[in-house]
Amino acid sequence: MSPFIPKRFEAIVFGFLLSALMSFFVSFIANAMGIGVMTAGFMFIWMKSWLTSWMFAFPTVLLVAPMVRRLLRHIVKPA
């Protein structure tokens, strides 16, 4: 199967997937610790929390990633 997303969108797709996965796991941990996994309606609460987190995480990753790349150029030794 050949890729169907053009290379020029790689950074956006990377940010989309990274923010989705990070917010998914972090929201689970935060909700599990805050209200407990066995709480009635946990899945609904967690999914609502995740989607809300993701709405903020995705644009944040897109804004912050270039700054992190520049910072890394100063602190990582070239090969």
Image (cartoon, rainbow, N blue to C red):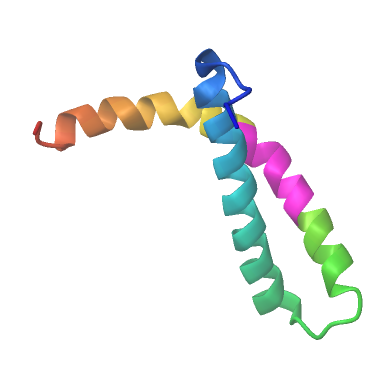
Does the segment drawn in magenta span residue 55? yes
Q: What is the x, y in percent for residue 64?
A: 46, 30
Q: Is residue 71 above or below residue 57?
A: above
**Residue farthest bottom in this picture:** 38
The answer to whether residue 29 is visible is yes
Q: Is residue 1 above or below residue 10?
A: below
Q: Main secondary structure of the magenta part?
A: helix
Q: What is the x, y in percent for residue 62?
A: 54, 27
Between residue 20 and residue 1, name the one nearer to us.
Answer: 1
Between residue 1 and residue 30, name the one nearer to us.
Answer: 1
Q: What is the x, y in percent for residue 27?
A: 67, 61
Which residue: 65% across, 78% down?
A: 33
Between residue 15 and residue 50, name the one nearer to us.
Answer: 15
Which residue: 77% across, 47% down?
A: 52
The answer to whether residue 60 is visible is no
Q: How many dots with numbers? A: 0
Q: On the picture, is 38 further left or further right than 32?
A: right
Q: What is the x, y in percent for residue 3?
A: 58, 26
Q: On the picture, is 3 further left or further right than 48?
A: left
Q: Quadrant of residue 57?
A: top right
Which residue: 17% across, 29% down?
A: 74
Does the segment drawn in magenta span residue 76? no
Q: Is residue 38 above or below residue 73?
A: below
Which residue: 57% across, 52% down?
A: 22
Q: On the picture, is 17 further left or further right than 31?
A: left
Q: Quadrant of the N terminus?
A: top right
Q: Quadrant of the C terminus?
A: top left
Magenta stretch: give its range: 50-58
